[in-house]
Image (cartoon, rainbow, N blue to C red):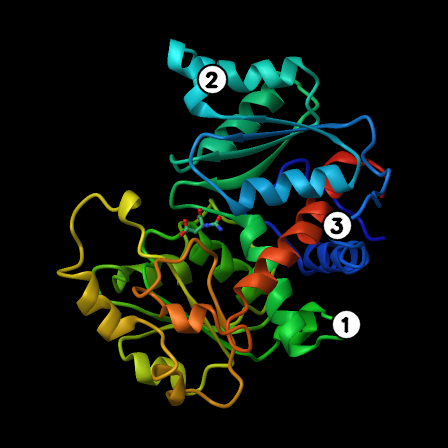
Amino acid sequence: MSIWNHKHIIDLACFSLEDYRTVFDLTNKFKIIPISGSRKLPALQGKLIATLFFEPSTRTRSSFELAAKRLSADVQSFSPSTSSLKKGESPLDTVMTYVAMGANVLVIRHSCTGVAEQLAQTLDQKQKNVSILNGGDGLHSHPSQALLDLFTLAQFFNNENPSINDLVGKRITIIGDILHSRVARSNLWSLTACGANVVLCGPPTLLPDEFLDFVNNPPSGIVKDPIKNRGVISISRSLKEAMEDADAIYTLRIQKERMSENLLSSLDRYHDEYGITHESLKWCKQNVPVLHPGPVNRGIEMSGELLDDHSICLVDNQVANGIPVRMALLYLLASNKL
Ligand code: NCD
């Protein structure tokens, strides 16, 4: 097994190709363990994984908890609405409670950008031997989602033995509310690192031209990019054009809760212009899959019929792959055994 030298996983900007390969190798090993039944691996026996979700979640939190249990870790979760946050305890003091209980990994989700990173810095300053795994922070980053998306795409292109090489030269079109999407930002890092070219498509209010400037010229000093030859990112304002040469379509939820103002005149109009349906897929090549991180607004970013069409829509594969991918991430942070 190769060298893994990350104490925390905050975003994918610092991931090398070797890191992606390591995650894929472990995922391929873990995914053959049956989804149900009593078979568990003893790898994280005696470790404590705490899932601290300050923002709602269905699949990410459950997936991390199942992943931890499948590796025989103890799992402690927390629900903001029934916690001492209600009595005025600060989020940091809440987190420190789980550190004092001996947590080895804290999986944290928060609506504010930068919380996971700040927390990691604070814990490092306090010399605490605990890892932070970002389960989604504000608009910034959602690394485990992007890694499971990457794996699902690679598996679609090469079902036998998915590898990051399967992404080289592929054209992935991401459609929708890109401005508010931490999933899109993380996918941009992972897809381009593995040599895929990404086309972004959406209305100007949800995909301003400046977004591209930020992606192509990140503020200096912030990003130390370990990837030499990244895939190219471009913007297309025409859905037809964006779909025509795509090898896969990735559509995103309209994130009303993260919008500070009304950026769309009507959701029906959005669906007419950017919603993905069996009809609009006729612009694509044959057998192009559709992905979505969930939760889906049926009939807005994607038609209900398409969501239920498992011959095209890979949402269930994404959810299923989330477990072995997260097992890999928890194993890498908590096992100290590579
Ligand atoms: C995403 C999230 O919370 O960032 N969902 C997820 O984790 N599966 C995407 C979204 O909220 O639309």
Residue 83's disc is 2
- Tell me the tag on residue 161: 1
- Where residue 282 sits: x, y (%)? 39, 89
Q: Closer to the observer: label 1 or label 2? A: 2
Query: What is the C-alpha distance between the residues marked 1 and 2?
Result: 44 Å
Callout 1–callout 2 Cβ contact below 8 Å: no
Distance in Å between CA atoms under marks 3 and 1: 23 Å
Displayed quadrant of residue 63: top right
- What is the distance, in whole Å, between disc 3 and disc 2 at their CAs? 31 Å
Decide if residue 4 is in sight here: yes
Q: Residue at x 47, y 45 (%)?
A: 221
Is disc 1 placed on a helix, strand or loop?
loop
Q: Quadrant of residue 31?
A: bottom right
Disc 1 CB within 8 Å of nearest ligand 1 atom? no
**Mark 3 vs 1, N-terminal side:** 3
Q: Earlier in the sequence, mark 3 or mark 2?
A: 3
Amino acid at the residue labelled 2: Ser
Circle 2 Cα neighbour tier, 10 Å, few/some/many (<14 / 14–19 / ≥20): few
How many residues crowd mark 3 within 10 Å: few (<14), some (14–19), many (20+)? few
Q: Amino acid at mark 3?
A: Ser
Q: Residue 288 at x, y = what percent?
A: 51, 82
Give the left or right position of residue 200, taking residue 74 as reference: left
Q: Amino acid at mark 1?
A: Asn
Residue ID at (50%, 33%): 116
Q: Is residue 283 above or below residue 308?
A: below
Specify the quadrant that holds the C terminus. top right
Q: On the image, which quarter does residue 244 sit in?
A: bottom left
Q: Nearer the viewer, residue 147 or 222?
A: 147
Position of residue 150 in the picture relative to residue 171 (left or right): right
Q: What label sits on residue 36 in the rendered view?
A: 3
* Nearer the camera: disc 3 or disc 1: 3
